[in-house]
Amino acid sequence: MRIQELAEKVSGEVIGNSDGEIHAVGGLHEAVAGQISFLSNPKYRKLLHSTSASAVLVSRDWDEPTDVTLIKVENPDAAFAEVCKIFCPPPIRYQPGIDPTSVISDHATLGKNLHIGPHVVIEKGAVIGDDCVLLSGVLISENARLGAGSLLHAGAVLRENVIVGDRVILHNHVVIGSDGFGYTVEKDGSRTKVPQVGIVRLGDDVEIGAHTCVDRARFGETLIGNRVKIDNLVQIAHNVVIEDDVVLVSQVGISGSTVVKQKAILAGQVGVAGHLTIGANSVVGAQGGVTKDVPPATYVWGTPATDFKKYSKTLSNINRLGKLQDRVAALEAKLADGDKD
Amino acid sequence: MRIQELAEKVSGEVIGNSDGEIHAVGGLHEAVAGQISFLSNPKYRKLLHSTSASAVLVSRDWDEPTDVTLIKVENPDAAFAEVCKIFCPPPIRYQPGIDPTSVISDHATLGKNLHIGPHVVIEKGAVIGDDCVLLSGVLISENARLGAGSLLHAGAVLRENVIVGDRVILHNHVVIGSDGFGYTVEKDGSRTKVPQVGIVRLGDDVEIGAHTCVDRARFGETLIGNRVKIDNLVQIAHNVVIEDDVVLVSQVGISGSTVVKQKAILAGQVGVAGHLTIGANSVVGAQGGVTKDVPPATYVWGTPATDFKKYSKTLSNINRLGKLQDRVAALEAKLADGDKD
Amino acid sequence: MRIQELAEKVSGEVIGNSDGEIHAVGGLHEAVAGQISFLSNPKYRKLLHSTSASAVLVSRDWDEPTDVTLIKVENPDAAFAEVCKIFCPPPIRYQPGIDPTSVISDHATLGKNLHIGPHVVIEKGAVIGDDCVLLSGVLISENARLGAGSLLHAGAVLRENVIVGDRVILHNHVVIGSDGFGYTVEKDGSRTKVPQVGIVRLGDDVEIGAHTCVDRARFGETLIGNRVKIDNLVQIAHNVVIEDDVVLVSQVGISGSTVVKQKAILAGQVGVAGHLTIGANSVVGAQGGVTKDVPPATYVWGTPATDFKKYSKTLSNINRLGKLQDRVAALEAKLADGDKD
């Protein structure tokens, strides 16, 4: 496809040779002639001068002269996603049909246009909305409900009674509704299991990464709001509430009954203690350990998690400790000299 | 059920209206009229004055006046668990029976009253005790042994030769007996796999959360004691010994050959180096990184993990570093003034 | 087997009674008469004086006198692995054959001498090399390619189009090719999924632990080099490059587009931010949080990860903060006295 034609498809403006032919996508670093790339992270701006790509999507405010042909667009990230759709293999289309090796209860309710792969199990009382795709080995347990247009990758599990919204994507081996971790401690120090009789309720347009677990509530509901995006290997304990549009990056762990308010972002490996509230639009930096409530629209980091500016100041103070010791030693020497006088 | 009747079932004393009717359970925050709630964590005591619950289970030493009807009990947590059994949907009962899609070796030994779900695989030499429930896709590998009354959720795996006790609960996708992570380093820097020829031995009444892995021993046994409770996404390396009544919270990682003694508790995301001993009844705070032995009955926190009081003092010293710098600057100014004199 | 005979098999030299009979292996701590053990970690040298083993493999430079019979070898670790092969149950041999419950597309290409277990699924366009073992429930998705001599444990998943080398071992529930975690943020704060149209490419002789996820590239390839060894529960994000002979210990998380150069080692629970480079032969200490590039052959620790010596110095400075405060207070008192004079 000619560069000019491509630019029109993404409402972009060509700076340079609009006649070049593009037939594939590539990263700035590894792209070769005939490929289109994009610049989104300013960290990579230098690569624009060395790339072999035949065209690069940049933002409209780009003003450095370069040799490569540019296509200026509103959002290079989004435009590149559009371009990928043109040049990359289309995502797999799962045709409606039920594999004969699946085991489906007569007492389950199935929607229309379902793709049910090999060895899927759907237990009694389960309800599956229209246009869902359940890949091999998926389990929909008793009385679980799955909304329309959802995609469950191989090995994903809905445990009994959980409720999942529309257009949800669960990656491989996700578990929704495992028992919460709750025990009463007996006098001899042994533990007795507290029945976890609640459920999990997931909103619409949620995506959850491979191997993530969401525990069912002790009673009531563990709640995941609409459009929540969760990465791989995340742990969400019983009775947690994750509000709409929250983002949880890989390996985050959230303890029981904590509430994460709308649009908050928890970076990778963050841990949050139980019974806390993380305010709307707040961000917890990677590996942060949250031990008390986080106000709305606040950026915290560290363990215990602290306001980012304050924490950065503390880190810089720590790094100057050697100098501070020297200064104190100098004062001590000076005063000792004074004594000698 | 009338509040008075309910109180009798949990050996409690009613303070307030014993005639009210209860028909469900709920958290203090979200409960409505007709529901019973409980107060266990003192952090929530204020909710007792705003809850809409019709009754609340509290401990016997509660002495604040409130408008809501109270039921005083020895242990509100345990009493609430009892109440849940009355009002919540009973746990699913799995009927004995063997699904025809399961694949069971003729050379396996099966106990009585087994529930074997769809697509379960039991290999030769495996031994399954009486009254076990194996849900869909469970794998019992060659010569593995599973004790009586155990419940393995969908996707749980016992690898070859491992030994699991009675009344064990394994949640979805738990792996018992994956290879330990061991290599010898060759002169060219490449690594040669060290065969992991040992096993895992689990005691009785163990519960293990979704996606947790317990690696088989390099030789000998990785050992998990009786009544050990392990949360989701925990990693236990080869030749680790976890003694009786230990609690490991979500995302803990324990390196090879470490010993965790009786009743120790490791909070979420704790990491422990290899070849260490964590003493009986000790606690490691969340995200702690244990780099040396922890004495018995000790509370440690931080990385490297340190006695909690000492670590808290250090954290407070760090937070006063700005002031310390100011004090040193003031001293320097004073002495400089002195020089001028 | 006589100790002398055993010593010859590992090119070792006997110090002590070469006539003793060995019939099993055991750890120094738990071994009994008739067993052979080994000393590799110097931390355990004291155990050599208390062990009940009948022989112990030690390195050639060992020079402490002991009562137990020693076999001096070049590498006690490697020698013990040899000895394990003699005395331990041989690893399971999976015979060629295709289980009738597997579901294999007519449009897949199968090599020779395959062991395909129960409920395995191989989709159209997939290519499986010779001598592979696919255990129960393994999924090879559309157009995925698996090299010869590989072993995939139960529940392992190759997603569509991924490419895996020869002699690869994937432990239970490993996921290769789950979607990367990428979204564009809309003006209302909601997120739109960025199609993840790239693949994962794994080299030869890679081993990956249970529950580890490797995300497919946004475009292009997420790359895992030859002889890379990855432990359990590790997260590798989209477009990451892991070069040859790298070691990633359990629960490590690596963010998008980061490059880990040859022979680097990331210890347990390390987190690495995106778009960074970790130099060849570098080591990141356990729980370290890497926030900027790490030069080659550097040992870093802490969050943010810092040169190990510098970080150790900082930790020691922090631990002396109490004393520093005392010294400043003493100076203040002295100067206050001076004022009074």
Image (cartoon, coloured by chain):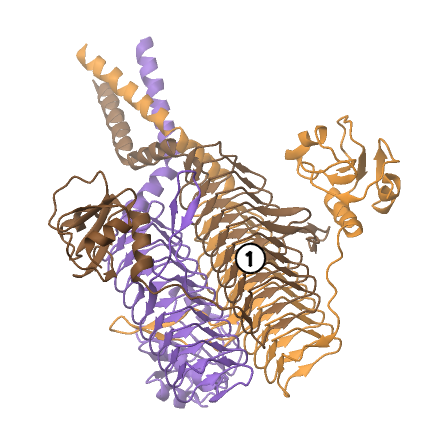
Chain colours: A brown, B orange, C purple
Q: Residue at x 38, y 71 (%)?
A: C207
Left or right: C74 in relation to A238: left
Q: Give the mark count.
A: 1
**Foreground residue among B62 and C182:** C182
**Foreground residue among C292 and A217:** A217
Q: Is residue B69 above or below residue A236?
A: above
Q: Is residue A50 visible?
A: yes
Left or right: A142 in relation to B237: right
Left or right: B118 in relation to B182: right
Residue C263 in which image quadrant: bottom left
The quarter of the rendered structure image containing the C terminus of chain B is: top left
* Residue denoted by label 1: B232
Residue C10 percent coordinates (x, y) = 35, 84
Q: Is residue C242 above or below residue A313?
A: below
Residue C245 in which image quadrant: bottom left
- For mark 1, name the chain: B
Q: Residue at x 37, y 28 (%)?
A: C325
Residue B270 percent coordinates (x, y) = 49, 51
Residue A262 percent coordinates (x, y) = 50, 38
Instruction: Identify residue type, mark 1.
Output: Asn
Q: Is residue A90 above or below residue B162?
A: above
Residue C192 percent coordinates (x, y) = 41, 48
Left or right: B83 in relation to A70: right
Residue B221 in which image quadrant: bottom right
**Foreground residue among A164 and C3:** A164
- SS at mark 1 in the image: loop
Q: Is residue C63 visible?
A: no
- The crowding category of the residue bearing disc 1, from other C-alpha atoms within 10 Å (few below 14, some 14 to 19, many at least 20), is many
The quarter of the rendered structure image containing the N terminus of chain B is: top right
